[in-house]
Image (cartoon, rainbow, N blue to C red):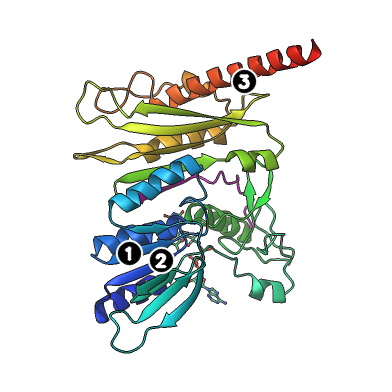
Amino acid sequence: MDDSFAVHRHLTEHQAERAVLVGAGYIGLEMADALKQRGLDVTLLSRSKTVMPTIDPALGLMVGEELERNGVRVLTSVSAMRIDQAADGKQSRLSVIDSAGGQHPADLVIFAVGVRPNSDLAHSAGAKLGASGAIAITRRMETNLSDVFAAGDCVETYHRLLDRPTYISLGTIAHKQGRVAGENAIGGDRQFAGALGTQSIKVFNLAIARTGLLDHEARSGEFNPLTAATEANDHKAYYPGAVPLHILMSGDRATGRLLGAQILGAQILGSRKAEISKRIDIVAAALFQNAAVEDLNDMDLSYTPPFSSPWDPIQMAAQTWVVATRDAARSNQVGMAETAA
Ligand SMILES: Cc1cc2nc3c(=O)[nH]c(=O)nc-3n(C[C@H](O)[C@H](O)[C@H](O)COP(=O)(O)OP(=O)(O)OC[C@H]3O[C@@H](n4cnc5c(N)ncnc54)[C@H](O)[C@@H]3O)c2cc1C
């Protein structure tokens, strides 16, 4: 919050007109949205090929287009190398030099390049750290030091699907871990149930949400993932204001187990919302229960034409996944038969 108040003060006191944002993760994107709403000229530099590298690049491209549609200058595959103080009399006080030689004038530069756990104090007191540098804890949120519990951005997070510690810094997780640590610290016996990496974000008129594992994350957990893409209207097309939702559904080819989903779409339709975060939460709830992709089809979800379809878009995405998996298995069998012949 201190940083946020400092940015706010700086914008007001210095009448800043140009901002350069370094980093296109969700915080950089939210800053781009917020600063543009305040009327600033915004440039966003991203080292990754598409913005928001925590989602599939195909969706990341759409987010980049939304930023550009709203006047944000988006530069991908470049790093910020240097910030020069502009000579007196120049329009802007700073100039950010990127790895492609570009120069970007700025009154304000914001770095949003990721989070590192602040675990030095605990480490110096003898707390063990995990591979990520975060404090290693049990699922009861105990450190290796007796009577010392830890929770939040400074600790490793048990991942429910991967069944091992990961590092995910989110407020949703910090709250749950804090409750477990607090309860155990006063004599209770509670376990942290595990994270799924569920998150949602607004970028101008888009909502983007994900839960579970991307393919490369799933492979690191010894799953054999298949991800299928579906485009489905958020509600019945004959009812005004329907918008397409882009859904990626992931599951394990061998077991059919649900591994995750990503959804992107326009969020505000007149006075209503496309319920993208509600939809990702349905998938998150199914993931939490170790459901199969096909189980999504059996769920009794609500329907009325202004809000959904008899098959909700996430159920249509589940059906696409089932067909894609069968097709992939069949072509694999044909391939093997041809090789054998
Ligand atoms: C811009 C931004 C947007 C975010 N948006 C979301 C979102 O939409 N959804 C979501 O789930 N998460 C979001 N997060 C992440 C979320 O804020 C963090 O995961 C969460 O705040 C972590 O909680 P925490 O208590 O571990 O750490 P913090 O909230 O960082 O609190 C740590 C506190 O400890 C204090 N402290 C540190 N060292 C010491 C010390 N030695 N002695 C005493 N006090 C100390 C700090 O001053 C601070 O007050 C966002 C983060 C940022 C930066």
Q: Quadrant of residue 30?
A: bottom left
Q: Which residue is mark 2?
A: 21
> Which of the two discs, 2 and 3, labels the residue nearer the N terminus?
2
Q: Observer-nearest residue: 6 or 298?
A: 6
Is residue 43 within the magenta segment?
Answer: no
Q: Which residue is mark 1?
A: 42
Q: Where does the C terminus fall, quadrant-wise?
A: top right
Question: Could you tell me how far apart the alpha carbons at marks 2 and 1 are, in whole angstroms?
Answer: 7 Å
User: Disc 3 on helix, strand or loop?
Assistant: helix
Q: Magenta: predominant secondary structure element?
A: loop
User: Disc 2 on helix, strand or loop?
Assistant: strand
Q: Position of residue 69 (x, y in %)?
A: 29, 50
Please rate how many residues cluster around mark 2, counting C-alpha atoms within 10 Å: few if below 14, some from 14 to 19, many from 20: many
Determine the residue positioned at 52% across, 55% down. 48
> Which of the two discs, 2 and 1, labels the residue nearer the N terminus?
2
Most extreme residue toward the front, as rendered?
101
Q: Which residue is mark 3?
A: 328
User: Disc 1 on helix, strand or loop?
Assistant: strand
Q: Amino acid at mark 2?
A: Leu
Question: Could you tell me how far apart the alpha carbons at marks 2 and 3 are, in whole angstroms?
Answer: 42 Å
Where 326 sits versus 201, above or below? above
Q: Position of residue 242 (x, y in %)?
A: 26, 29
Q: Is residue 204 left or right of residue 168?
A: left
CB within 8 Å, label 2 to label 1: yes
Residue 49 seen in the figure: yes
Q: Which span of residues is magenta-colored? A: 187-203
Q: Position of residue 1 (x, y in %)?
A: 40, 70
Q: Amino acid at mark 3?
A: Ala
Q: Amino acid at mark 1?
A: Val
Please rate how many residues cluster around mark 3, counting C-alpha atoms within 10 Å: few if below 14, some from 14 to 19, many from 20: some
Q: Is residue 245 left or right of residue 259?
A: left
Q: Observer-nearest residue: 312 or 244?
A: 244
